[in-house]
Amino acid sequence: MPGTKQQSYNQGTPGRRFSLIFAGLLFILIVSFILDIFLGSVNIKISEIINTLLSGADGVTRQILFQFRLPKAITALMVGIALSTSGLQMQTLFRNPMAGPYVLGLSSGASLGVAFVIMGFSSNLSPDAIKGIGNWAIAVSSWIGAGLVMLLIMIISSKVKNIMTVLILGIMLSSGISAIVSIMQYFSNETMLKTYIVWTMGSLGNLTSSQLNVLVMSVMAGIFLCFLSVKMLNALIIGDEYSRSIGLNIRLSRIIIISGTSLLAGTVTAFCGPIGFIGVAVPHLARMIFKTSDHKILIPASILTGGIVMLISDIISQMPGSDNVLPVNSVTSLIGIPVVIWVLLRDQKRRDIF
Amino acid sequence: MGFAPGPETKGYLLMQSKRKEILSLINLELGFTSGKFRNRLLPPLNSCANECELIAVIGRNGIGKSTLLRTIAGLHRMLGGETIVENRNIIEYSRIQLSAKVGYISTEVVKASNMRVYDLVALGRFPYTNWLGITDNTDDEKIMDAIDKAGITGLIGRPISELSDGERQRAMIAMVLAQDTLLMVMDEPTAFLDISSKFELMHLLHELTRNRNKTIIFSTHDLGTAVREADKIWLLTDNGLREGAPEDLMIDGAFNNLFDESKVRFNAHDGTFYVNNEEKGQIYVTGKGEIRFWTEKALIRAGYKISGSQSEISVEAPSEPNNPWKCTTEEFSVEFNTIYEMINWIRDKNFTF
């Protein structure tokens, strides 16, 4: 008897529908990736691109494609993946639909870490030495910064249950951190300041190939930790107490999830500057598309959706055909904010669930 | 839904005498520590629970019922003593081992959008699944069996945010059933439920202890339910824990000190509590059966005691429906169509004697 009921429930619900949606999303992701490479400030005809690829001749087109657009597209993909998966993990860990790396101040924490490296420790060093600090130092400092903010939010949200209060405290935290960074800017010399300001502007296109390596490796490690925590995340949905009673080691799961999110959000902030609202918005899009609470589905869904949204944001920010480039941060905000507002304005009954 | 008596039922009587001890509390000290400061809630507790028992935990608010239950589930640190579950102290179990021994349901409401009843119940398999939490056929069978036993087969694909209080409580029970523990601990399972869901839930708990080998410990404020349904009561007072069959405790007068006696009184005849109203006098009631019973109830609420012999005022409850109530005193003899009218009249006259 139980067997037949099981089948009737499963039939047509998860399995096949999910694989279809995944295939569709993957297709859109590939298309956006290719479009991101093809479209840009310089108009290159498709025939020309195919020609360059086939002939293998060295030329301007090849340079634009391989030295500029391809790394940029890969960066966009990584950023989208990293921010959305870290947002998903944070929302489940804090049981707060508004949680995300940018909103709760992880990005500012990461910038504080970077500011310390650029303006603090190296303030007695020559500008050449800063280059020597290396990409890993910047990455590690951003992880530490993001991780500390994450811990602080964890402590706050264990005392304060109201999600709006946690949100406001997150904003306060970001403002406080910005204030500290401003003070550091005030006391640092011109070269440091310039190095830091250029960093904060952030962009997807400024990464050197070695930076791209660090980014890709860190994001892969973060995604690995994220998949490691699938079962824990699924248990955490029902709340701390119940998740412990069904056998979750809550301390271990927090360590893994906090490390994963700090790694993901920190690295992205370190190399691309603060990019807002992808982390909050994309997990909601993933839930909306798949209508499930299972992180086995939601993590890959957020990876695909995040990649797509970020690639599309990048395409828009390049304003294909024109010489102007929009800051990518503005584009992601304009895409993400409506989703956040929609989540906030959903019917009251569902407001504090996610 | 019925449980056909199988071959096991025959051996049941024999087993009853040597039922296994599932849980024992030995000098258990409950409380909180903050820094060096130790705040012990109660004197050390000693008690035990056998296989297939339904145990109700009773006590006033704040006495430590929830803390006791959370301690048994391993969610709260013991200050001292031992909690033995299946022959081992719970601190010797790892979190995941303990979760295969003790299931726990609190008053907290699980809130999650997009989570379906099946998903929730499947989480009960957490201690048994691999690192990805993928359920195999055995797990699926246990999940479906739990859903079946909890009587929520029709709700299997329903989002948990759309369940009623009673349905949600059943879904939680199904989750704990899927967890496959011998001991289930529930904090006020009937708290939010309406009367019919409350009875259905108690029926379910009763059945789980009888036919599924479960031992269930639940806390409640509803003494009537506890006295009627529980095999044993753990009564928490400031002096510690008293245990026994509800009837034993009743005969011992253990319930009398449960509340402030000047305000609430326990009636050992029917196992209910009365709010102690100021007594205005005695009334003699005649009549039969149900109608007399409810007439007496109303008079007690109005502040009168039912006297055993003829008194200054007497009420005659009608023996047939639709006949009037007669109220006789030295001056009056009045008839009323409803109890309500009669009580109003008596209150207006404000007889005191």
Image (cartoon, rainbow, N blue to C red):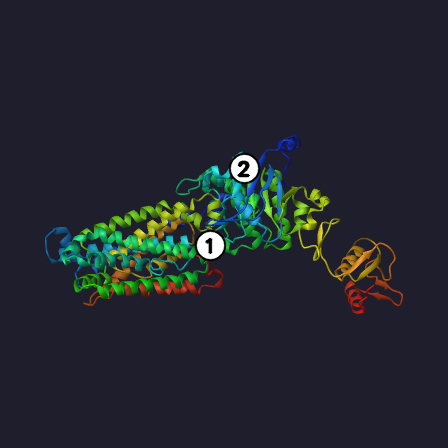
* Residue that mark 2 sits on: B84
* Residue that mark 1 sits on: B112
Estimate the x, y position of residue A86 in percent, counting from the top left.
Answer: 34, 53
Can residue B319 be seen here? The reply is no
Marks 1 & 2 on one chain: yes
Estimate the x, y position of residue B292 in percent, counting from the top left.
Answer: 81, 56
Q: Is residue B71 above or below residue A189?
A: above
Q: Is residue B246 left or right of residue B136?
A: right
Rendered residue at 22%/52% (across/down): A137
How crowded pointer 1 is (Cα within 10 Å; few <14, some 14-19, many 20+) is rated as many
Rendered residue at 18%/67% (across/down): A323
In front: B218, or A10? B218
In front: B221, or A80? B221
Tag 1, which chain?
Answer: B
Work out which quarter of the rendered image holds the N terminus of chain A and state it: top right
Tag 2: residue type?
A: Ile
Residue lying furthest front: B36
Tag 1: residue type?
A: Ala
Estimate the x, y position of residue A106 in percent, counting from the top left.
Answer: 33, 57
Question: Could you tell me how far apart the alpha carbons at marks 1 and 2 are, in whole angstroms?
Answer: 34 Å
Indicate the quadrant where residue A119 lies. bottom left
